[in-house]
Amino acid sequence: EDYIEYQHESLQSSSDDAMQIDNDATTKKSSTKIICAIPRRELDPENKGILITTITVHRQKKSKFFALAQSELGDVYKVTLKVDPADKTKVVGMTVALLDTLPVANALNVSKLGMLFVPAEFGDHALYQFERIDLPDAPTCTSEESKMAYLESSESNEIAFYNTANAYKIAKKFRPTVLKNLRKIYTMDNAAPTTGVMVGELAGNEVSPQIYTLNGRGPRSSLRVLRHGAAVTELAVSDLPGTPGGIFTIADNSEEAFKAGGKRNDKYIVVSFADATLVLSIGETVEEVGKESGLLTNAPTLACSAMGNDGGIVQVHPNGVRHISKGKAKQWHCPGLKRIECASANESQVIIGFAGGEVRYFELDPVSGNLMESATREMGADVCCLDVGVIPSGKSRSLFAAVGCRDLSVRIVSLEPGHLLTQRSSTALKARPHSVVLQQMGSSTSSSGGGNASIADTALTVGLDDGSSVRVSVDAVTGSLGTNPTRRFLGARPVSVSRISLESSSSTLLLSSRPWISRLDTTSGKHIMGPLSYVPLDHGYSFSSDAIREGIVGTAGKTLRILSVDSSGMGGDDESFNTNKCALRYTPRQMTLLATGGGASSGADQQPQQRKLVLAVVESDYNDFGMETKNAMGFDATGEGKDVKKQSADGDAMDMDDSDDEEKEEEKKDDMEEDDEEDDEEEKEARATPIRGPLPPGPGSWGSCIRLVDPSDDCNTLDCVELGRNEAALCCASVRFHSRGGEALLAIGTVTSMTMHPLAHVESHVALYRLVNGGKSLQLLHRTKVEDGPVLALAHFQGRLLVGIGKTVRLYEMGKRQLLRKCELRGLPTMVKTLQAAGDRAFVGDMLRSMQIVRYDSTANRLVLVAHDPFPRPVASQELLDWNTVAVGDKFGNICVLRLPRGADTGAVDLTGTRALWDSSREDSTPKMECLCQYYVGEVVTSMTRASLVAGGAESLIYVTVTGRIGALVPFTSRDDVEFYTQLEGFLRTDANRPTGRDPCNYRSYYAPVKHVIDGDLCDAFNSLSHEKQSNIAEKLDRTVGEVMKKLEDTRNGLL
């Protein structure tokens, strides 16, 4: 602590000689040690040492090197050795200078390109770039200063001199600031540690629920909102004159664009309404055009596309087909009173469908440039959707078209000359098709050598009216459909399907209650499907321009939106989630959901109509000061106090410099201010770094607050109540007292001056807060002092508050000045850690002795122990599954499911009073809980919840771990699934790779034998096996490889 010493075998003999001279006391004392004090923070106490946690050495050119050392507070120091100019191999001194303050890291990795990667212990990892390595102005300590201080002191023992008190006098003092010598250029998400989880649709305007997690420690803590799906960037939004019925884009197929080669941009956006068409021109801005485009604007558009390579356009409307070529429009009118109901077009082909099942096919004549009618056919059923497909690279036409009929079928018809509209294959569906897309999934750019030919996969995607989609492979030669269609439920609305481009490969956009994207993963060869984290879209189409190479143009209600999709998270084994963060002040301990406006209304005020959901988060940090104390000490958590002063001074100087032309100068100034603000924000983000507050001089100091956030407004903080007097909030719960009229109150369990070693505290309280100002702030009602231990768990129980206090469970009623004690149960094994209530039962999790089930006897007003688990589990989290079943996560990384035996509830309560007291108090007289499932996760499970991640889907057990993992336990609903996965798991135990180096069954049975749980990670390893092993396992299961992979995919899709 406090010093860095250079040790070498050449210094050992000299040091021994120096000690010999000092002991003889015959000459003046001297020092041969090379020891350097470490620069210290100005606000840290004198008795606190500096602990170096990480050190790394970086070698430079010409045999130069330096070391980076990081302290437990995050301060990074540059350590440089001084060598003798006469003898380059002899070290004569050392210098320690402050580099910057970074997050506490597990290691420091310096690259040859001047980069520093910091894998953080907790919180996000970061990559920094060195801006300077010479630190002339940084706080610096040298070994000469330490040696001189020792020689000037009266201490004769050199080892005893180098202590914390002397280090505080020798070392240079500094205050942490923003980054000065490093610049953050990249951040990698890291959810460790995750201390809480909640699942629900709290945003108010989305379909699927969000996952709310508590993450981080200290100043790097955050509340994260995870949404399943790829992140979407909204580039433009504009209002439309009405509700559109479709949207299309037309590519630029002029001769100039054709000669330029490469991917062509779009030149028009076509929006179809019930009785009109709106045409928008794409350039530097999107502007409306009229008849200049040649398109018919007084009728709805069913389909449109660029036609040929001479700037031609084809438009299909209910009364006919319009072909615009070289500035002239040619019209094909429907015969008689027929009207076109659906249509599809590409660069040289058009297919239309009439009422009654008639289909007509048009093809572009390459010689004359005219659109010619080629074939007509009766399908035998009403046609509801069509798709002519895309023209493969190097071909002149699409060989097949897909026709969806109202008889619940989709048919593949041929477009080859001589076999036009001949049916090749068909498939029956369980619902009426709403839209169809026939395309080649995979790379959209062809190579001359045909290297990407094996990647392309022709697939038919069908959107159904029941909200599900069906994907089936199509043989590119014969047109026959595959035998294993993949079906997935997407939402409650009919599914609309269209083609888009993503990462230069063909993809499919599916629109239902939320947008989805399906594409082929070129690395694994599997089709992957993931949602977009965005509002529901009514229509969508591919969009490309100079500014947006791969985008989506869509409509939602009466608005037109241009979007860009971040596909970096789509693909691989992990599902794609995008994250929004809300910064917290201290380490989050627990969170609960509060509903405002649920209480009794006074007078004519209709409070229940203004119901609003808010999140309450309790935060606390040990060995830290409160915010008020930090501000009084002059601590700056941002570290940019000096920079702010400079910016304000510069701003005043710029205001004094006026120009003669005031209007032009104001416009220029506004533009410059906007640019400067953007640059300042980027620079501020790149320079920001977390700074831990000053350390308290003694134990028992806490910093804590209660935060109220609004999940419907990006989790912005509504109110933050800071706790003082070393009071720490450790738990919270939402409670509705019957005596209060059902108003939702926030109950907080606090301890004062608690120490960990030994575990002790001064006092404990239960505080009640109410929501005021429409749920925007908290108001303290009263605080109740409690005895018998710290308050670690709270729960709402039958209109009252159930509190876990040390070894006691106590039931409280609300009073005017404090809580009123009603009854209690003493004598629990060690300490109450978790509490949950259901009916008249309370499930109590003990810190060391597993679960206890307590029942409230209303007739006798007492709490009775009903059953307990005899297995000693150190409970860390729990979640009720039903009236008799509870899931438990312990500190050793196990998850188990416990159930109350049948009849144990009635047998445990003596209603007659005839049972002897000593008989009822015996340990073996209490019923034992049965263990239904046992599984070793491998990490401490910090929180669990029972929820569904898909709207209307089945519930699963969602859990989070201390390292940031989010996992799920999915219940089986059929015996066939149990038998299939049991056999698959048994075969994979011998054939799959072993990342842990142990047998998978032994690993999952680390503390107790695994029971009634299938290892999903092991089953997913089937996709990574070689084809030979997959075939052998599938043969043993009496299935094909495709059926096994489809079964695995369906199970995953059932969860997400």
Image: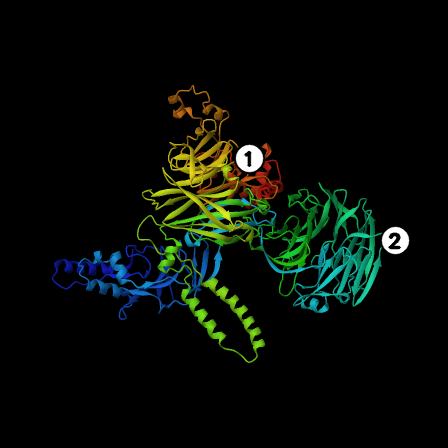
* Residue 919 horizontal side relative to residue 20, left or right: right
523 and 437: which one is in front? 437
Q: Nearer the viewer, mark 2 or mark 1?
A: 2
Compared with 176, 836 (above or below) is above
User: Residue 638, labelled with which disc?
Assistant: none
Q: Can you tell which mark lies on residue 983?
A: 1
Q: Nearer the viewer, residue 125 or 587?
A: 587
Residue located 83% across and 61% down the image: 331
User: Is there any visible trace of residue 460 in the rendered image?
Assistant: no
What residue is pinned by disc 2?
A: 336
**Badge 1, how many Cα within 10 Å: few under 14, some, many 20+?**
some
Taking the view exactly as shown, the residue that stands out farthest to the front is 603
Q: Residues within 10 Å of mark 2 (few under 14, many from 20)?
A: few
Q: Is residue 267 left or right of residue 1023?
A: right
- Distance (Cα) linking label 2 and label 1: 64 Å
Disc 1 on helix, strand or loop? helix
Residue type, numbered disc 2: Gly
The answer to whether 391 is drawn above or below residue 472 in the figure is below
Left/right of residue 918 with respect to residue 12 in the rendered view = right
Q: Nearer the viewer, residue 233 or 430?
A: 233
Residue 753 visible from this viewpoint: yes
Q: Nearer the viewer, residue 69 or 271?
A: 271
Q: Are marks 2 and 1 in contact (CB under 8 Å)?
A: no
x then y, percent, for residue 141: 30, 64
Outermost residue toward the top in this view: 914
Where is residue 154 shown, x and y percent of the image? 17, 61
- Amino acid type at image mark 1: Gln
